[in-house]
Amino acid sequence: MEGQVLFFRDTWAEVDLDKITDNLKAIKEILPSGTEMMAVVKANAYGHGDRQVAETALRAGATYLAVAFLDEAIALRKKGITAPVLVLGASRPKDVNLAAEKKITLTVFQEEWIKKAKDILNQNAKLKVHMKLDTGMGRIGIRSKEELKAVESLILNDDRFLFEGVYTHFATADHLDHFYFEKQLGRFNQMIEWLEVRPRYVHSSNSAAALRFPAASFNAVRIGITMYGLTPSLEIEPQLPVVLKEAFSLHSKLVHVKKLQKGDKVSYGATYEAAGEEWIGTLPIGYADGWVRKLQGQDVLVEGIRAPIVGRICMDQCMIKLPYYVPPGTTCTLIGRQKEEFISVNEVAQKLETINYEIPCMISARVPRIYKWNGEKTEISNSLLK
Ligand SMILES: *Cc1c(COP(=O)(O)O)cnc(C)c1O
């Protein structure tokens, strides 16, 4: 564990990089041959750790990385990642020289933006760009032939731009109903026909489309959620052609255990009342760690048995009702497996009435991450003490 940082709290997340490797290899198997994989590592790799996941993904066969905004791309460069990185969101024209210098690829879709960038770009700069087409997502991108022609000619007429890619994004690739997906795919095929030059990369698929619709793979796909072992949606989970392995788990250790008598109360508002003699344990995790107050009632695993969170979740701690006396120091699992029991990311998402994507993202930077590689602990990352 070279250069490791320690942590001094009894709450941590584990990220199993072997599972990320297995997921990507399984996905690559079913892609049309020659399809490149872009690993989407935005939002600190969906909360898993941007550098660690980027390195793992590149080793597992990804050839490109993608992030949401320029700062995330620069963060990867600062951490020594030299692979190509695409910024999926909008960047500012004034930052084009920085992007060019750091060999970061930007997404472009506005005529005005290109004009401003031309005024700012250094004489000898080389900026790689991917053109974004809005085929129905309604977020960012070119929508008409006129815009596409104008943006393309501004790029092609200036050798400081390298027109490297064109892409779109699907709004409903994770729905059972294909109708809107087909409509977007048709529009994308039509729009790329309008291009004078077909760039090296043509890509449209996120995880759901990559796994379900090979015809939408073109020559690259953008893999996010499935790399982490999570399904793009519950409705398509039964038909996914690969077995996904969840890479993220969350753990804490009991810091206190006590016996309550009938009528004794627990936590703020004194809303929970013991019905009789009860063993109550305290875990050092709370809403500031991302274990939000709405998770009151959610189970935690203790010795492979489900134990519910009782009383209000505090900023840094919460209480669970134990099945029997368990000593302080016992490891509890909030997400992941213990013996025969498993609390999935999906279970937590359903409790919060949200999607699985949100769960690892919301486990805050205050929770250290332990990385496993080749079945062994390889690194501890603690953003508090780095
Ligand atoms: C986040 C994102 C992805 C990855 O989507 P998943 O569903 O996580 O695979 C792909 N493309 C774009 C444009 C994105 O913003």
Image (cartoon, rainbow, N blue to C red):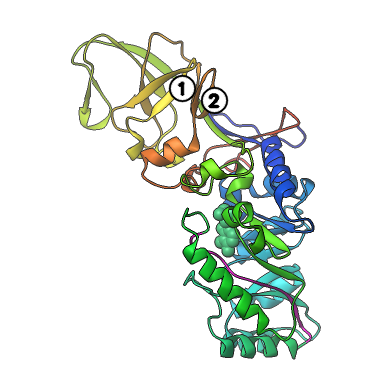
Q: Nearer the viewer, residue 205 or 41?
A: 205
Amino acid carrying label 1: it is Leu
Residue 331 to residue 112: above or below = above
Crowd rating for badge 2 (residues with CA inside 10 Å; few <14, some 14–19, many 20+): some
Residue sitting at x 70%, y 65%: 218
Q: Position of residue 275 (x, y in %)?
A: 21, 15
Give the magenta-colored segment's residue range: 159-172
Residue 22 to residue 323: above or below = below
Residue sitting at x 47%, y 48%: 358
Residue sitting at x 50%, y 26%: 342
Location of the C terminus by quadrant is top right
Crowd rating for badge 1 (residues with CA inside 10 Å; few <14, some 14–19, many 20+): many
Q: Nearer the viewer, residue 381 or 325?
A: 325
Residue 112 to residue 325: above or below = below
Amino acid carrying label 2: it is Arg
Q: Earlier in the sequence, mark 2 or mark 1?
A: 1
